[in-house]
Image: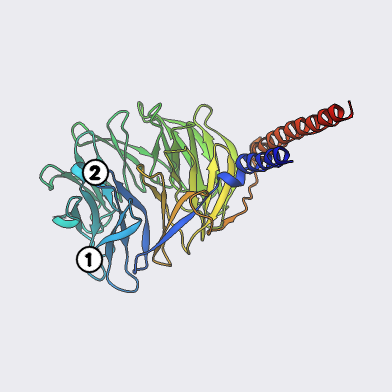
Amino acid sequence: MRGNAVILLALFLLFAFLSPAAHADTVVTTINLGNTGTQGPPVYDPSNGDLYLSNLGTLNQATISVISGSSNSVVANISLPENAAPSPPVLGPNGDIYFSYENDLIGVISGSTNRIVANITVGAGAGAPVFDSGNGILYVSSVVTQTVAVISTSNNAVISTLTVPAPGVPVVDPVNGNVYFPSKAGLTTVLGATNAINETLHISGGAGTPCVDTTNGNLYVPGGLSSVLVVSGTTNQVLANTTTGAAPWTPVYDSSNGNMYVAVRTTATVLVISPSSNQVVANLSVGSNPQLPAVNTSNGDVYVPDGDGITVISGTSVVGTVTVGSGSQTPAFDTANGMGYVPNENDGTVSVLGPSSVSSTATTRAASSSSSSSGGGFAVSFSYLWVVAIDFAIVALLTGALLIRRRSAASWRRS
């Protein structure tokens, strides 16, 4: 009897382990920042293991919160003027953190002291800075002055100013070293080697911030109001045009599977585009008002903030959703502990996500997804059916083995 009980327990544990729900993320802990208006994504600094998160300060003065990845607690709050409106921070060289605030300033935080060590004056209406690790340059767009400040991080000084019509947040192409600035006119290319404007690809309706496919160097550019253009990083020519629906976010590239993920706010969906064909291979339903997704590099899954939750996508399937705080924003991931950090704008909190085995107190919402593209819905439903079929097959085999064992024992007793 004891042997039978052990086998049944093993069957139960095996089924629970292989079940898709058992592998879902959950909220391990919630960090209270004491300040609302939190903006994602945070930035992770591997030099000290801390994460930096900007807070607009709708209840009190603006701050940059510093969260320790080892203790999951706030270890510093860097105070800013009341209406400073800090941008999401970016990681620069030597563990320093850069962010824009007070309309025309770039603040520099030392990762070793967690204090502001420099302020750099740029044009009015400064946006979030972008760092090019290839040349050590920081680029800051200023929509009011229609200029781009080129900043050397070796001395934190502006070394040149470029004129770009209504520039948006740029992106660096690590394949060719160029920097691309979206604008109402289209996409302007700046040569990273010389910091000179090369050319502008005119796009009707303007361009949004692009995403680079680091495998082939092509750019995926939100163009106009309802499409994503595929632009060659070599020739700056449009290779394909994919219809997405109104208001697509910046695409996100998942290097683990080579797909592009585009969140579309008006349809509450995420489109999965295969760069091999530049076709939509899945159209997945997510929560209302999806924000910019993020890729968890530790497992290749894509995390989509949508209202009060995070929808988790693996490949072309929704594999789970996790309830977090109100107004969830784009998360960041700590590569040391593998956890995700989700800012909740309305709560002034950060939800820390980890494997469900870490905590049993948080609840995970049931996942639901649909597909309107060819083959997309099949991919979603087939993923679950396949895993469940394997579960039942293994359980059936082990149950059959248990029955055979019982019959053999009974025959032996009768003989």
Is residue 244 in sight in this rendering? Answer: no
Residue nearer the viewer, 179 or 307: 307
Q: Quadrant of residue 134?
A: top left
Q: Using residue 343 as the reference point, say whether residue 372 is left or right of it.
A: right
The image quadrant where one finds the C terminus is top right
Secondary structure at badge 2 equals: loop
Indicate the amino acid at tag 1: Leu
Residue nearer the viewer, 17 or 324: 17
Q: Relative to 96, say whether 61 is above or below.
A: below
Q: Which residue is mark 1?
A: 80
Q: Which residue is at a point 32% across and 49% down the rendered structure image?
A: 43
Residue 339, numbered circle: none
Indicate the amino acid at tag 2: Ser
Q: Quadrant of residue 392?
A: top right
The residues bearing labels 1 and 2 have C-alpha atoms spaced at a distance of 24 Å
Is residue 158 in sight in this rendering? Answer: yes
10 Å crowding of disc 1: few (<14), some (14-19), many (20+): some
Task: Determine contact: label 1, label 2, CB under 8 Å.
Answer: no
Q: Using residue 360 as the reference point, say whether residue 389 is left or right of it.
A: right
Q: Using residue 414 as the reference point, say whether residue 197 is left or right of it.
A: left
Residue 270 point in image, percent of width and height: 54, 46
Residue 219 point in image, percent of width and height: 40, 34
Q: Which residue is at a point 66% across and 36% down the rendered structure image?
A: 387
The image quadrant where one finds the N terminus is top right
Residue 47, numbered circle: 2
Q: Which residue is at a point 22% across and 59% down the rendered structure image?
A: 124
| Front label number (1 vs 2) | 2
